[in-house]
């Protein structure tokens, strides 16, 4: 059984590394320990990410991993590893890299990175970009002891560029806090590539390829379009480190200046606004339905005559005006009788 002493002081990344190979019993013990220490939210966050990681392993296991041992053959020099040609993660914060460096220094490297070696012997990174970046910085700072990194080899005879993107996207999203914009752009590109092979591909089918819901991938694809179409807003949101897709979608939908959109985001960050408040602005801003005015026919106008002279109005009229109305009503009555006789005669002939 693991000793969980001081686990409450560690970061999410460190805890994921430490618990990567734990069984259900150990995970329950970890949760109980963290609950006693008043760190329930942190424990649940770690357990959720571990669950995501297991899903990633199940996806990658379809391609079969060659497990690591501690032999020299399962360690590679950093410069031997080429970047993923479809690398999905472009946005890193120095804070993320520093946290990973601290974790490696404190706990050594527990989880191997995943690599693929092609027929020419070239090794490409599949998963572990943050760890590889951290090792490179540590090598610069502390020398050759960080020149080699532990790896798992992905067994696959044929591995195309779509595979590189799909596996890297699945693995990065599960194992690290990948930036929302990176996720959005790659989901959109991946969807467009899959559509080239299958023009009838639905969002539901595409989402199931990644173990996600339709809403999840569709929202990210919409965010990718926002990045392309509202570049200034996207740059400002990137600076503010916004990580709520619902907030981004709500703000982007508003037909106002970028500065005003950013002002709303800042109010949200300060707790002065909720996302629902911003979504309500979209509802208010939407154009009201125009009332359809029906064009009245002659028959409609005649039928609405009673609105002109109601019983109440008629009874209030002086006798002279009543006589005028009675005279006109008699004329209308005669005309109606003539129309009725004419229509009846035509019906009898037919």
Image (cartoon, helix red, strand yellow):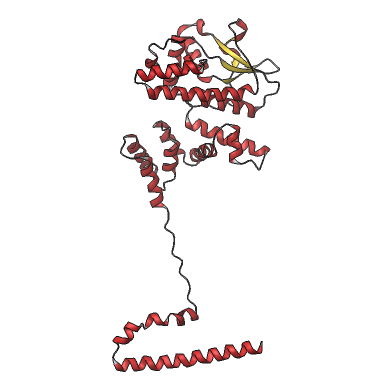
Q: Is residue 236 left or right of residue 297?
A: left
Image vertical order of residue 12 relative to residue 162, above or below = above
In this rendering, is residue 211 above or below 72?
Answer: below
Residue appearing at x 47%, y 15% in the figure: 26
Residue nearer the viewer, 340 or 182: 340
Based on the displayed image, in which of its 4 quarters is residue 97 positioned?
A: top left
Relative to 203, is 242 on the left or the right? left
271 relative to 18, above or below: below
Residue 243: x percent and y percent? 43, 32
Question: 199 left or right of 311?
Answer: right
Question: How many marks overall?
Answer: 0
Residue 124: percent from left, percent from top? 61, 19
Q: Give the residue drawn at x 46%, y 82%.
A: 302
Residue 55 can be seen, yes or no: yes
Q: Quadrant of residue 192?
A: top right
Residue occupying the point 41% across, 46% down: 254
Residue 330 picture location, percent across and down? 43, 93
Q: Quadrant of the C terminus?
A: bottom right
- Tell me the residue at 68%/15% (across/down): 121
Does residue 133 appear anywhere in the picture? Answer: no
Residue 233 locus on image (x, y percent): 43, 39
Q: Residue 319 or 252: which is nearer the viewer? A: 319
Specify whether 221 is left or right of 255: right
């Amino acid at each position: 059984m693991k000793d969980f002493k001081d686990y409450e002081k560690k970061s999410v990344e460190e805890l994921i590394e430490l618990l990567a190979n734990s069984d259900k019993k150990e995970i329950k013990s970890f949760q109980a320990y963290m609950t006693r220490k008043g760190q329930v939210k942190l424990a649940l966050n770690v357990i959720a990410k571990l669950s995501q990681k297991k899903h990633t392993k199940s996806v990658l296991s379809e391609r079969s991993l060659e497990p690591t041992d501690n032999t020299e053959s399962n360690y590679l020099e950093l410069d031997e590893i080429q970047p993923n040609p479809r690398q999905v993660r472009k946005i890193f914060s120095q804070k993320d890299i520093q946290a990973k460096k601290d974790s490696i220094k404190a706990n050594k490297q527990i989880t191997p990175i995943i690599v693929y070696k092609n027929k020419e012997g070239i090794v490409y990174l599949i998963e572990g970009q943050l760890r590889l970046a951290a090792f490179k910085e540590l090598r610069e700072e502390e020398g050759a002891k960080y020149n080699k990194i532990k790896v798992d080899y992905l067994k696959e005879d044929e591995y195309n560029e779509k595979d590189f993107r799909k596996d890297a996207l699945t693995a990065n999203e599960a194992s690290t806090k990948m930036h929302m914009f990176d996720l959005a752009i790659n989901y959109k590109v991946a969807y467009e590539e899959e559509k080239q092979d299958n023009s009838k591909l639905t969002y539901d089918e595409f989402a199931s390829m990644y173990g996600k819901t339709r809403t999840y991938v569709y929202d990210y694809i919409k965010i990718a379009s926002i990045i392309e179409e509202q570049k200034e807003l996207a740059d400002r949101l990137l600076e503010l480190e916004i990580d709520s897709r619902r907030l981004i979608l709500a703000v982007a939908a508003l037909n106002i200046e970028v500065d005003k959109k950013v002002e709303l985001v800042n109010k949200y960050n300060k707790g002065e606004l909720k996302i629902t408040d911003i979504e309500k602005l979209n509802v208010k801003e939407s154009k009201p339905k125009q009332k359809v005015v029906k064009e009245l026919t002659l028959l409609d106008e005649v039928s609405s005559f009673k609105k002109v002279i109601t019983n109440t109005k008629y009874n209030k009229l002086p006798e002279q005006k009543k006589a005028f109305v009675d005279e006109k009503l008699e004329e209308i009555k005669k005309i109606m009788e003539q129309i009725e006789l004419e229509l009846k005669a035509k019906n009898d002939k037919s």
